[in-house]
Image (tube, coloured by chain):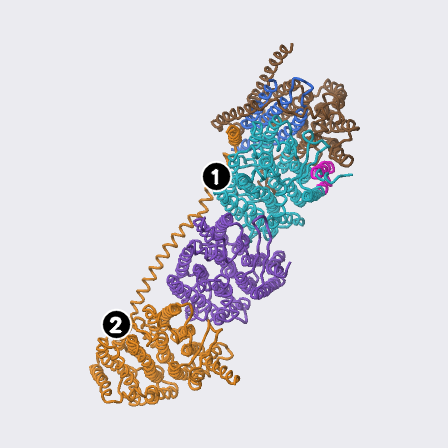
Amino acid sequence: MVSAESWIAVPVVVPLAAALLSFLVRRGSLFISLAAAIINVLAAAILVNQFFVSGPAQYAVGGWDPPLGISLRTDGPALIMLVLTGLTGVAISLYAWGYFSFRIDQPARAGRPEKQERFFWPLWMLQLTGLNGLFLSGDIFNIYVTLELIGVSAAGLAALSGKSASITAALRYLLVSLLGSMSYLLGVVFLYKTYGVLDLGLLQKMAGPTPGVIAALAVMSVGLLLKTAIFPMHFWLPPAHANALAPVSAILSGLVVKGSFFLLFRLWFDIFSPALPHTAFSLMGALGAGAILWGGIQALRQQRLKLLIAYSTISQLGYLLIAFPLAFTGGNSQTWSAVLFMASGHACAKIAMFMSAGTIMLHLGHDRIRELAGIRAYLPVTAFAYAAAGVNLMGLPPSGGFIGKWMMLIASLSTHQWLWALVLLAGSFLAVAYVFRVVEQLFVIPPDAPFIERHPRAGLLEWPALILALISLLMGLIAPYPLRLLDTGMAPQVVQVIGG
Amino acid sequence: MSWENALIVAILMSSFLPGIIIFMLPEKSTGLRTSLNLFGALLKMTLVVIMDLAIYYGRVFHMRLELMEGVELFLNADPLSAMFATLSSVLWLLTTIYAVGYLEGSPNRSHFFGYFSLCVTVTIGIAMAGNLITFLLFYEMLTLATYPLIIHRGTDEALAAGRSYLFYAFGGGGVFLFAVIWLHTLAGPADFTSAGFTPQLIDNDAPVLRFIFLLMIAGVGVKAALVPLHGWLPRAMVAPAPVSALLHAVAVVKAGAFGITRIVLDVYGIKNIIQLGLLPWLMTLSSITIIWGSLRALQQDGLKQRLAYSTVSQISYIALGISLADHRLALIGGLVHLVHQGLMKITLFFCAGNLAETLGIHKISEMAGVGRRLPLTMAAFTIGAMGMIGIPPTIGFVSKWYLCLGGITAHNWWVIVVLVISSLLNGAYFLPIIITAWFGKQQGSWPREKNFGRFETHWMLLAPPLVTALAVIVAGIIANAQFSPLAWVEFVVQEYTR
Amino acid sequence: MTNMLYSFTGLILFVFGLFALISCPHPLRKILGGNVMSTGIFLFLVATSYRTDTASIDPVPQAMVLTGIVVSVSITAVALVLATRLQQSANRAMNRREKKNEGGAAEG
Amino acid sequence: MVFPAFQNVIMHTLGLSLVAGAPLLLMAGCCLRPLREASFRLLPLSVLPALLAVLFIPPGVEVEVGWFFMGGAMELDAMGRIFLTLTACVWLFAALSVHEKFRQDPHRFRFAGFFLASMSGNFGLILARDVLGFYLFFALMSFSAYGLINHNRTEMTRKAGRVYLVLVFLSELAMFTALVFLSARGETPSISAIPAADFSPLLLFLLFIAFGVKIGALPLQSWMALSYQQAPIPAATALAGAMVNAGILGWLRFIPLGHIVLPGGGIFFIVMGSLAAIYGVIFGLYQDKPGRALASSSISQMGLVTVIAGYGLLSDEAGQAALTLMALFAMHHSLAKTSLFLGYDMIDRGGRVSGIFLLAGLLLPCLSLAGFPLTSGAMVKGALKELVAMGGGSWYLFGKVFLPISSMGTTVLMLHCARLLRQHNRSNGEGNTTVAARLWIASIALVAATPWLWPPLHNLGRHSLQWQALAQSLWPVALGTVLALVWFATGSRLPARNRDVADFDYLARSLSGGFMQILVAVTDFFAGLRHAMESWLSRQENLRDFIRTRGPGKWEKVLGRWSVVYLFYLLICIFLFIIMYGTLYS
Amino acid sequence: MDSAMTIILTGFDLLLSATLLWLAWQLLRSTDIFKAIIFFICFGLLMAIAWVRMHAPDVALAEAAIGAGLTGPLFLAALRKMERKQKKERRFDPEEKRDNPDKRWQVRSREASPLMWIVAALTLCFAGLLIRTVWIIPRPLPGLAQQTAAHLGASGVDNAVTAVLLNFRGYDTMLEVMVLLLGAITIWSITHAPFPPRLPDTSPVQKSAVRLLLPLICLTGGYLVWQGAYQTGGAFQGGAVLSAALVLLLISDFLWLPDMHSLPLRMGMVLGPLVFLSMAVLGIITENALLRFPPEQAGAFLLFLEAACAISIGLSLAAFFAGGRPASDLREKPYQTDQPDTEKEGS
């Protein structure tokens, strides 16, 4: 009968089926998707369990072993992203439920929110499929297909609100995504030309500093950087994220950029680290530093909440990159783990923030930061969720962000890379500034605060945000578990390389 | 889990859980909120006292939670933490009562009391932190927990104060984090022990260690309001009186001073720090702070502002005592002032709050003759102020006495000069308040008078300052008794002067 | 030789497409550029598999290119629809503005 | 046998505790609304435990109260007994007077409270065995006295109070510092074991300031005239009669006279003392208010005490002699002063005593102070001469010249006082003055009788009865009397307008004011600097504007262009290419 | 003979490459976008030839059908949609260039011109690096030809490309079909089919031509699907041909897609992916691996799969052409006036 290893297919197959069904059967799309999200989490949990029992696994799709066939694999990084996506996926689904029922109850334009809901679910499920496929895939061309799946569904989601601004942003997003994935594909071709295989595991064994790898890494990295919205190439992100519907912003900011980042991470640390010189890592660090500072400054100057959050995403992505030189020279595997740990902490926090912003916007009708005061009286949970998520962005204990920052600082100080440490601190200060710009508005209730009617389903909007925010806030306390996942997941060769 | 662990957790939870529940309570359920608050406070106090006794009889309280390799949460209740925890929990009870009275009928109380409880939880966490990471964790959380309290009024001024607070606190926090990590990379993960880190390190990295020390002091110095870093404190006075009391006596400023103590005694260790020659720096810094705070206090007309600057000055007594850490008496003086300053300053803030709440008085120039209208409040105020000046038999005298003794046994005349000048200035800014309150002639009517029936003000506003004022006197008179703060501090100091 | 030649052609097509995607302001041109770019990559990829000997031709790149073509047409279609929507709303806005201007002129 | 001993301990502890405790309890009673009437009625009884203790507590009983204020201890030693007796008597007089005078006063409870607190402090410091206990009670007494001085709350009393408070505060600080120096070994010494070895001139100077304020030593005297005049007369009685002694006792307790020789310190004391003695006289002659005149006489007399202490510091045996002599002088002075103040009180309240009797009654303490034969003054001055003789050398000569002059001056001053008292306007003529009169008479009796009844004075008394001594003590008084009479007869008065100048009031005020101004200026400067820095840092508006409109905003737009992004795309790509090729070829 | 052949072929290769590059350059630089699209179609056709030259007939077929055959019309339709209204409403502007209907596209490019030179130089540099890399990649190039050939027998089909596509790398194809469906879903989510795609003057000749052609096209499509197992052809090619039939129907007013109910369309679009997915899951259940087919029946399975996919692909491609969901589906108020949104989302 069905073997235990086949669980690995579930995170791909189930959302896929849900996407098809929810496109086909529109009425029940919500519940189909919700069920799929929950099954997805369960599958992720089972995979984690299997991982702890029997270590990294490889699964040949169709029974064809690589290099001929495609393999799926679970290892630490993949699993942590899988679990993250699963958890946040459920939260986002719940939130979207509340969000759309809210909007459908108060239609601003006939039919529009309903249309949005109908198409949201299949698109979201395909997005989930793409992400899970990306994390699990062990084949570089298959990864390209998942990237496209992610890219197109993300553009579709971004365009869902139907406003001109969001359409513009979505088109730009789509083109950027096209450019990114084409660059990636070019890299795939180079690799195939050089080694004649597409499997990650085989590539890892073969890879060395050869011309093909060099070209592949250069174009793939730059493509993925573009897709991840790293600093000088971030232009597409803020409009896309800020103009989308709230659940969509959450998906885009929390998960989608993490997908391409994960790939970058995998390429640089898992597969090709032997081929990469130190300077390359420093370049990544420099880009990260630029992102942290620039994103922070831009976040400071925004007048709108969602734009602020979007720019903070840019800033936070910089942290992930700044970890590259630190992990390379840090001489300890922790920094390596810190990257993904921080990424997942940030994902939870960012999703919670966008959810809060969406809730506020639904209730208030706008998201101008200066006019938010008083909202706490009606949406206390949301206000708190925003603040709690902000703690993660600021990197204060005990959040996941803190643990990540801690490990990075340790690495930078123990290897005397002062500059990175200073940038990390400066980024935190900027984060404090832009988080509290909002929080101070959220936390006060002026006497003349306007009265806002609470939607009966507002709980569905508020609590998922709070739970994610709390997860991000308390992630530091449960750090040993994900870190264990990462530690065991690392291939011995990589440990050697990074450690040496 | 042994009962010791359970006790630690229970102590933390006894304010945390009520805090969480209070957050969720609707605004209207005043009774439930108040009883939860008081129940939590009483429970916490009881538990802390039990813990004190157990510590006195040699029990060890440890709790570890590993976050990752080399980073663990470590809660450890040694006598020093017990001292701070006791102070905080007792004063929290009083402040809670006071706050309930103070905020009666004002909006957003669930929010307020929720953060109030979180704040004390975090403070207890600071007290019981057993290593730098844990300390840092709670230290940063303290900023977060107090910020909503500072901006509670929601006025522009409050927001500006909040911003200033954040600027300073997170600036300090960042510097502190940096220093902690730096030290971590040099010395590895280490718990607070009276020995500090290994002496070999000094041979290799003395200049770096010095620099780290400066960074650390700057980091915690922000909360302890050491002089160039004190700017937030007077501004934060826009917060309601219970918050000021909390900031000055229970939580924030205390946490900073406690941090200095920990850094000198437990992170570096007395021996090491002397070898590094760092104490004179600390002494200079604290002396400047003492004098500066007093001088600035002299020029304030706002009562709370004056008190705030007085805190700036007084808190550095602790640092001054610590800076003579190799002399037992000075150490005792410094540590005992941690408790004493808390009692005295909270009295003063309670009284200032009473003046503001009952009569609408915010300025010293409006206080003439107020002693007749609020005799009990002003009596408490007088006692608190006397304590601040250091007039016997108040506890202020006790700590000053020990500090001076420490100075003289160390042949460090500087300390005495500083303390005498400071006392002179303390007198110069407190005595006129007392005189004008008691002997001045009332000018016209009070700015905004409220009547509370039987007592001169709401009983919940009256009882806490009276209790603390009594404590200011009694704890001074019985300083040598077995169960006084002084005795406990001597117990604490045993560990460090062995 | 042949595969080298076609590889170069493919790469140059890629670069052309890239340049067009970036530098052309018109969305349709951008999308065209994207198409040229992908076609270039496909050519580059298939050139890899080319052997004079028909039997030893590697089918995997061809399969990949088939997949790629389909993906590419989807993206193109989506992008075109988006661009159309955008242009239409821009046109409408322009018309509205003109109408307003005309109305204003008529009144004035 | 254990039990009775234990019982004794309890009794002694209780007894000694009550000496200072009873007034405090009564004070507490005065503060509580239901008890205050009764407490006020019991006011004179508060002295009772002190008197009983003098009578019944055997010498050498030492009570340790370990928990009390860092280790308290009480003992009633010989010196203490003298002072306690004396002080208790004065306080008793004062208490009775208060009880009588303030019966109708609306603020009597407040006054009683301060009064009792001062009293408690005064008793407590006498009994205190440990320096901190002494300090504690001294502070209690000093600060409570502010309430006595500023009882009437007029502009003048407030000013008097302020001056007093400032000086008291200074003295407290000096004393505190002195105590710290005394404890330089790390533990607080007991009063009987003040370490002579560590005694430094600095310490002596600190003690001079600490207790000099109380006795009105020269630069610190300015509170006295103000307070004695402005305080209610019973309070002034207590100040002049009892609390001044606390200052003397302070010196006695803390300067281990007889164990140390500090010639420099001694000279300082002698000079300051003699200056004070002369200054007191001259200053007194300017006065036209009895209170002020009496205060200046106190200044002058206390100058003599300072001189005694100074001589005591010159050598060991002189120290021993000075020790006794200071105690005796204290007693002599306070009895005379008390009597004068009680007389003043009686006159002030319109007491009807016939002219000649009044004059006699007033003259007796005056002459006693001047050192008229057969009075305690003569005895004390005789002893002083012997002490001066011990000083040796030039200081002996100085004493020989100075003492008669001082006696002469005192005589003139005291006669001036008596005249002022006689001429005093009876402020409120009505009222029952029988109690006041009786008190006054009792005090005169005490002044007259003490030299002969008090055992320690027997020797001196016998000595003073010798002819030579009589003559020696008589001629300065006589000369002084003549001078005074001439002065009175010519009717000339010294101009009153220089009074304030002589008060050092201006000087002090302008000095302290200038000092404060400098301080304020300095702090303002730094605070301003800091403020400027902060506002520069947090000039958020400008910064925000910059971030929003210029700089970052503009560049963000540039970064939003496809071509710019493409530029970066190419740059990063080419950079990666090149560096990786670099590794390939290196 | 071989050498002569080689020379001829090399000449052909050079010519073809040069033509391709020239076409690409033209289509990217020509001033008129309409021309550019025409160039693009030509480019697609030439590419098909290039594919044939590369011995990739499957790709050639797909390119011809999809790359040139479908994408070109897609572009043309889009261009028409973009210009149509404008033309209608601004009749007095015959000089208006078809290119750059909106001025803002142009302004930016002029501004950026100095930058463009740098960028162009860097692009050249980039191209040089790429070419150089290809140049130095060691030869012979490795590949998976042997493995594929070795396992072809177990794949159930004879055509190696189809074997790779549907069996060895069936997972890729499953996701790829999803991407296609995703494209359709996205397009549906964006807008309605915005204008009647039929030509205004459908002549009777056209109609009858369509009537005649239709069965033929369908037959061709079916044949291509069927043939996929053995020779060139397969689901994509067949699907593309089917979509051509649908497009013909659309533009000839036979099928009025915007008026259709969306459910049958959705069912048709989902059919292929769903069958694919079911097969995949069936593989888990029966063969213990995702997408594993029992080797004996693999051929039948794959044929079924291809047939289902072809239908869905045809429908999806037709949906691309229609450019939106049926007008009756999920009606929202049309965007008559696209005022700046003042509703909930802010602006």
Relative to B496, does residue D466 appear above or below in the rendering? below
Frontmost residue, A301 versus E135: E135
Instruction: Name the residue tied to disc 2.
Output: D498
Instruction: Name the residue tied to disc 1.
Output: D552
Residue C86 rendering spot, x and y as whole percentages: 60, 32
Tell me what hue chain D is rendered in: orange
The image quadrant that residue E321 belongs to is top right
Element at badge 2?
helix
Residue B399 rendering spot, x and y as whole percentages: 45, 66
| Amino acid found under the numbered disc labelled 2 | Asn
Where is the N terminus of chain C found, in terms of image quarters?
top right
| Amino acid found under the numbered disc labelled 1 | Pro
**Residue E102 seen in this snapshot:** no
Q: Residue at x 52, y 68 (%)?
A: B462
Q: Is residue A107 magenta?
A: no
The image quadrant that residue D437 belongs to is bottom left
- The chain that appears brown in the image is E
- For the stretch drawn in magenta, what is the main secondary structure? helix
Relative to A325, does residue D242 appear above or below in the rendering? below
- The chain that appears blue in the image is C
| Residue E256 as seen in the image, left or right of residue A314 | right
Relative to B93, does residue A104 appear above or below in the rendering? above
Q: How far apart are marks 2 and 1 (CA)?
A: 74 Å
| Mark before the other along the chain sequence, 2 or 1 | 2
Mark 2 vs mark 1, foreground winner is 1
Frontmost residue, E127 versus B25: E127
| Residue A480 as seen in the image, left or right of residue A410 | right
Frontmost residue, D520 versus E73: D520
Residue A278 rendering spot, x and y as whole percentages: 52, 35
**Residues shaded magenta:** A10-33
- The chain that appears cyan in the image is A
